[in-house]
Image (tube, rainbow, N blue to C red):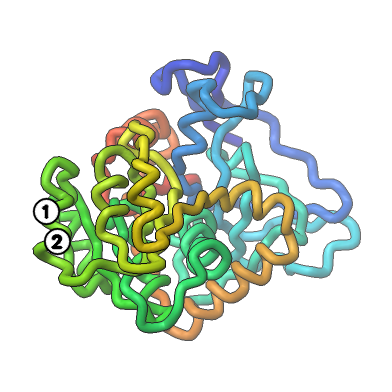
Amino acid sequence: MRAVVCHNPGELSDLVVEEVTNPQVRAGQVEIAVEAAGVNYVDALFVQGRYQLKPNPPFTPGSEVAGVVVQLGEGVTAVRLGDRVLVSCGLGGFAERVVAPATSCMVLPDSLTSPAAACFTQSYSTALYTYLHRVHLQRGERVLVLGGGGGVGLAAIRVGVALGATVYAAASTEQKRAAALTAGASEVIDGDPEHLKQTLRSAIDGGVDVVIDPVGGAACEASLRNLRDGGRLAVIGFASGSIPNLPANQVLLRNRSVVGVDWGIWAMTHADEQRRLLDELLALVDGGVLHPTEPSMYQLVDAAQALSDLLSRKVIGKIALDCS
């Protein structure tokens, strides 16, 4: 089978596509013919050697895949041959075949395409986990999503609307703002951090109850100042490349809160709760409440370019590799 291989962590351009041995299926596992693999920031960090966990090279990046079950290990009853499934695999996803525990596979509703499914778990789980477990969103509250044209941002818009919030979005380009409107944002604004403080005051009268921030940088402080009494700022990531230094007096004022969101660690240590969270999300998709955005598609051989475009924030929404 073909797989993307990282021999020397460092430069994205050093990634190569090679013929490698098919993984062996053991008891309790399944083999999946990968149709699409989601491309995430963590994949780039692994390849660059910047993630806190450093796998021994050579390794294949890729943490989210969707495809068809083509082989069952001994004792597997949770899924059947031919099922379309998604799975979070940690590593190894940028390949034509993946082996994973059957219990980690989620059968896909017919309405969810494999490319969209391959980009679903991290973004949508992060959004729902943030709303339910970290900021405790209430129906009718106002939410501001920074980076509203990115993968996490679009998921946060769609999930927030599904939970009954009024959602505003900030994004850096007209195309990204259009995507945020399509996702359900009530209003979109220019996300330029130099002018965001004033833009927020004029565009959203009275402020917001919750800010979802996967961007960081100067936009984070500007949005903090826009929180109402008891407002909550959820720090999800730093896609801008800059970690903000927030003024503590602005947290104190109006009884605001700043909360961290590390969905990945939570999911690894709360497997049963994460499965229920994902079940809830897939039920919303199956019921027509959530409509995940289709990702931009790249070929397997273009994995390095896909990761580079993701890091430079050139793409609206998510990216997936065609592994079929």
State the residue in front, 46 or 248: 248
Q: Residue at x 55, y 56 (%)?
A: 66
Left or right: 231 as drawn, with respect to 195? right
Task: Give the Cα separation between the discs numbered 1 and 2.
Answer: 5 Å
- On the question of residue 278 being in view, the answer is yes
Q: Which residue is mark 2?
A: 201
Q: How many marks?
A: 2
Three-letter code for the amino acid on which mark 1 is drawn: Gln
Q: Position of residue 38 (x, y in %)?
A: 47, 48
**Which label sits on residue 198?**
1
Residue 284 sits above or below residue 295 on the image: below
Mark 1 burial class by Cα count in 10 Å: few <14, some 14-19, many 20+ = few
Residue 32 sits above or below residue 142 on the image: above
Q: Position of residue 60 (x, y in %)?
A: 59, 31
Q: Quadrant of residue 176?
A: bottom left
Q: Position of residue 126 (x, y in %)?
A: 51, 58
**Which label sits on residue 164?**
none
Three-letter code for the amino acid on which mark 2 is drawn: Arg
Q: Quadrant of the N terminus?
A: top right
Left or right: 107 as drawn, with respect to 202? right
Q: Is the residue under label 2 in contact with that under label 1 (CB below 8 Å)?
A: yes
Element under disc 1? helix
Q: Quadrant of residue 86?
A: bottom right
Q: Residue at x 74, y 68 (%)?
A: 79
Element under disc 2? helix
State the residue in front, 306 or 126: 126
